[in-house]
Amino acid sequence: MQRLQMTHILVSTTLFLAAACGTGAGIDPTGDGDGDAEGEDVSSTSEGSSGGETESDTGGSFFPDMGGDGCGAMCDIWSEDDCPSGQKCTAVACEVGSLSWDSNVCRDVQGDKQRGDQCSGAGVDGMDECAAGLLCWDADPETGLGTCVEYCKGSRLAPTCDSPEDICVIVNEGVLPICLPKCDPLSPACPNADNLCLPDPDDKGWACVLDASGELGGYADPCEFANACDLGLLCLDAGVTPDCPAGSLGCCSEICELDQPNTCSGAGGGQECLAFYEEGMEPPGFSNVGVCAIPQ
């Protein structure tokens, strides 16, 4: 499925997104793009179903035949004219078999669908029906259809989104800068009710992100990606969740409200509701956001 130190005991301070099972896209938890778990923060994201092909015993390839050009011509995702006419710069997974977007390449424009339109091709091969400047995102696991979302505009240092309801989330080492709906982790209400509400890695707020938890994602379940926990939980370092299975990189634990009694599932093992943000560093409106964790 589409795969915080208290400056972030999140499994990873570098957010990686992954496609949910079946979408063929994901977020690498380590930030190094290889899909392993070498990073100390587990916050990556994954998606559930992909329109891309995967290798099989019959010799199929994860990517379409690019005419001998391999994964495709690399491009600058922040530039509007870095690809030939009729093509667009988009995010893909160039590593064969990977579910995590790791590169920006030119792909043929195959449609003109706009922000909010339903689309096919919500995977990691970059072949979708959305117009240039957009990506088919968050595929429905049953229909395979996703929704066109905009890539962020401006620059890496000054990103913008056209809609005031969106926030620019830059993940996967900058390969995937996309505009996603804003949300409140203490009262999440995303346009897609199946989405999670997760923190923006640049600490600008919280965004609605596809759920890649599958059958796991509950309290103390192992996780390696930011979107591998159920709504209301975050993937935190294994050491702050008392019931986390031995050998796990991270485990899911609850988001909590700082001004409320301690209702953490791991309270008996030393968990407290700790501030998610350092004092004075929280975005406006998020000063009461906490996470259930053992103080370090």
Image: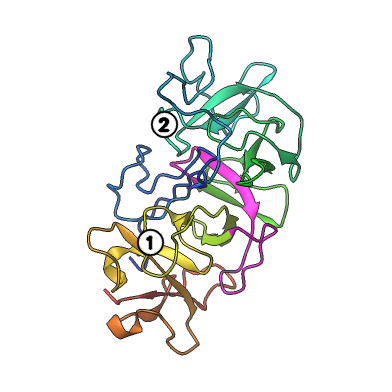
Looking at the picture, which amino acid does disc 2 mark? Answer: Gly
User: Dot 1, how many residues are within 10 Å of its Cα: few (below 14), some (14-19), or many (20+)?
Assistant: many
Q: Nearer the viewer, residue 20 or 238?
A: 20
Helix, strand, or loop for circle 1? loop
Q: Which residue is mark 1?
A: 10
Q: Position of residue 233 (x, y in %)?
A: 47, 68
Instruction: Classify 34 as above or below 262.
Output: above
In terms of image quadrants, where is residue 34? top left
In terms of image quadrants, where is residue 130? top right
Q: Is residue 79 left or right of residue 109?
A: left
Helix, strand, or loop for circle 2? loop
Q: Nearer the viewer, residue 254 or 61?
A: 61
Q: Nearer the viewer, residue 4 or 263?
A: 263
**Viewer-nearest of discs 1 and 2:** 2
Looking at the picture, which amino acid does disc 1 mark? Answer: Leu
Q: Residue at x 62, y 59 (%)?
A: 194
Q: Is residue 190 magenta?
A: yes
Q: State which quarter of the image contains the C terminus.
A: bottom left
The tag on residue 97 is 2
Task: Evaluate whether residue 185 shows in this view.
Answer: yes
